[in-house]
Image (cartoon, rainbow, N blue to C red):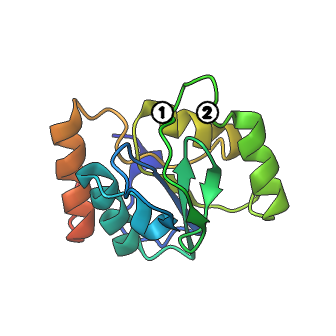
């Protein structure tokens, strides 16, 4: 554990959660598009943190507000047509959110790496987890308001 990852008693200005490979089969709001258990667990944990703003980092579209309507897609992070850190920085600049602090990123290493390219001091409460099971346990603890880290 590092002090950077302790989320005990603050409300972040921004939480960025990952998209997911399991999606609806038709256009939908980004809040509804991703139906996988990992994305849903990240969303519930993010909601429990009560951020000023919550965004989804889509591998295809970059930063999405919950009300953005998108088509289903099949682009994983790291693919040739996936969003880059440069695109992410441009999107954050246009939204005037580059200077927000504190920022929390929930997700795996590729997701966190992209978020960190815009917000270098991002808090990463899932860092160091030994696999998906431990990440899910940490997300559940966050959702339940327990000091899990």
Residue 33: mark: none
Is residue 147 visible from the viewing direction of this image? no
Q: Earlier in the sequence, mark 1 or mark 2?
A: 1
Q: CA distance from mark 1 to mark 2?
A: 7 Å
- Direction from residue 101 to residue 20 in the image, left or right: left
| Residue position for label 1 | 76
Q: Are marks 1 and 2 in contact (CB under 8 Å)?
A: yes
Compared to residue 50, the image places residue 33 above or below, namely above
Q: Nearer the viewer, residue 41 or 51?
A: 41
Helix, strand or loop status at disc 1: loop
| Residue position for label 2 | 82
- Label 2 neighbour load within 10 Å: few <14, some 14-19, many 20+: some
Q: Position of residue 128 (x, y in %)?
A: 32, 32
At horizontal 54% and vertical 56% (from top left) the residue drawn is 71
At horizontal 20% and vertical 66% (from top left) the residue drawn is 146
Q: Position of residue 119 (x, y in %)?
A: 66, 47
Compared to residue 138, the image places residue 113 above or below, namely above
Pick the quarter of the image with the N terminus. Answer: top left
- Label 1 neighbour load within 10 Å: few <14, some 14-19, many 20+: some
At horizontal 59% and vertical 69% (from top left) the residue drawn is 13
Residue at the outermost front position:
26
Helix, strand or loop status at disc 2: loop
- Direction from residue 63 to residue 74 in the image, left or right: left
Q: Position of residue 121 (x, y in %)?
A: 61, 45
Q: Position of residue 45 (x, y in %)?
A: 32, 64
At horizontal 39% and vertical 47% (from top left) the residue drawn is 20
- Direction from residue 127 to residue 14 in the image, left or right: right
Q: Nearer the viewer, residue 125 or 18?
A: 18
Quadrant of residue 142 within the rendered picture: bottom left
Is residue 131 visible from the viewing direction of this image? yes
């Amino acid at each position: 554990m590092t002090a950077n990852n302790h989320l005990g008693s603050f409300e972040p200005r921004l939480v960025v959660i990952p998209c997911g490979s399991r999606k609806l089969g038709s256009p939908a709001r980004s809040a509804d598009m991703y139906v996988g258990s990992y994305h849903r667990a990240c969303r519930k944990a993010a909601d429990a943190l009560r951020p000023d703003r919550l965004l989804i980092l889509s591998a295809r579209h970059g930063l999405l507000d919950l009300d953005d309507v998108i088509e289903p897609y099949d682009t994983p992070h790291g693919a040739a047509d996936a969003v880059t850190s440069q695109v992410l920085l441009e999107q954050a600049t246009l939204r005037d959110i580059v200077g927000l602090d504190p920022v929390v990123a929930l997700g795996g290493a590729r997701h966190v790496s992209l978020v960190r390219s815009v917000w270098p001091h991002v808090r990463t409460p899932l860092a160091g987890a030994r696999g998906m099971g431990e990440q899910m346990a940490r997300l559940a603890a966050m959702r339940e308001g327990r000091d899990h880290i």
